[in-house]
Amino acid sequence: MEELMISSENLAKLVDSFLKEGMDVFVPDSNRFGKINSSDKLVLDPSMKPTDISAKGVVFPKVDPIFHYKKDKEKVEIFETEPGNKQIVFGLKPCDAASFKVIEKVFNWDYKDEFFNRRMQNTIIFGLACTYSDEYCFCTSCGLSPVSYEGSDLFLVRLSEKEYSVMVVTEKGKEVISKYKDLFSSANAQKKTEVINSIKAPEKKFDSKKVKDWLDKNFETDFFNPTGEICLGCGQCAFVCPTCHCFDIVDEDYEYGKGRRMKNWDACQFYHFTLHASGHNPRDNQAKRYRQRVSHKFKYYIDRFGAILCTGCGRCSRGCPVGIDIGGIVSQIENLK
């Protein structure tokens, strides 16, 4: 992989060039990844806490129109959704960047989701080496690290306030910067190695293989009852998660004779998620629903796709209103017999 360097000044020029070309540029703030209209608002801080909400909405929006329709007594007209702009996303920590590779497996399983794939094709991801860590981080338990470049097209390592190392990871990344070669310089391999070696990785909390072994053998269990007793079923954990991907499809009328068919985020923690038309609900309490959440991430997705449905970002635990910590719960499972 090609290694380059770019100054902070030239990085700002690169962002302004993207904006002039009509691309949508997203950067993190404390809450979410939002669009900017000037390089003055570019934020690349490796020590920043992960945003409250992940970046998955860039390629998998919370509400996403499949098509619009107009109907009268005689006919129904369908209007296809227009393709979006090319998108550049800066400053994704490894736990965010890797999530896109994880969820694209389900969006290309038995059916290829053209909406997700089209956005992925139009999106360039600038990952960023991470120096933040707290009690909720466990990327190392999910096969990642603060310097993992999985899912990034270009991966940045901040060498100083004035310069960044740039690793060109994919052909898409190579193509997007090819016409801006004059903004880049030769790599400083020694400085990059020094910075990477100075980054402290979060302590590994659990062995995912041992967790899966227990989940394989313990579907009927009382282990999740204490969590079920306090869980509110609010779905915060799923909505901030970079890898949760469940959605519902609903037709919505917004004017007389006009409407749209929408994909809306859904969550297995909601009571109605598995409610049958008969009134029967196979997950009729919160303990069963939380068992589903853990099992989906650390067993079912591995069974189906060979990947953990979690990147260890810790968002669900940081934001849980009753203090449920999935990292702690999964760590307990590893030690169960």
Image: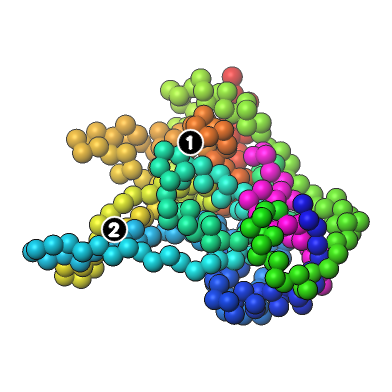
Q: Position of residue 35 (x, y in %)?
A: 54, 72
Residue under the point 47% across and 57% down: 118
Q: Which mark is residue 296?
A: 1
Of 285 and 159, nearer the camera is: 159
Q: Amino acid at mark 1?
A: His
Residue under the point 49% across and 32% down: 304
Tell me if 314 is positioned left or right of 286 in this view.
right
Q: Position of residue 58 (x, y in %)?
A: 51, 61
Does residue 335 appear anywhere in the picture?
yes
Tell me how many marks there are. Answer: 2
Where disc 1 sits, the SS reads: helix
Mark 2: few/some/many CA within 10 Å (<14, 14-19, 20+): some
Q: Is residue 167 magenta?
A: yes
Residue interval drawn in magenta: 141-168
Residue under the point 19% across and 35% down: 278
Query: Tag 2 or tag 1, which sits nearer the N-term?
Result: 2
Of 158 and 334, nearer the camera is: 158
Of 315 and 191, nearer the camera is: 191
Residue ID for mark 2: 261
Q: Quadrant of residue 156?
A: bottom right
Where disc 2 sits, the SS reads: strand
Of 248 and 169, nearer the camera is: 169
Mark 1: few/some/many CA within 10 Å (<14, 14-19, 20+): some
Dot in front, 1 or 2: 2
Residue 5 lies, with reference to residue 39, above or below; the image says: above
Q: Is residue 74 magenta?
A: no
Does residue 161 appear anywhere in the picture?
no
* Structural distance between the alpha carbons of marks 1 and 2: 27 Å
Q: Position of residue 111 (x, y in %)?
A: 40, 42
Q: Amino acid at mark 2?
A: Arg
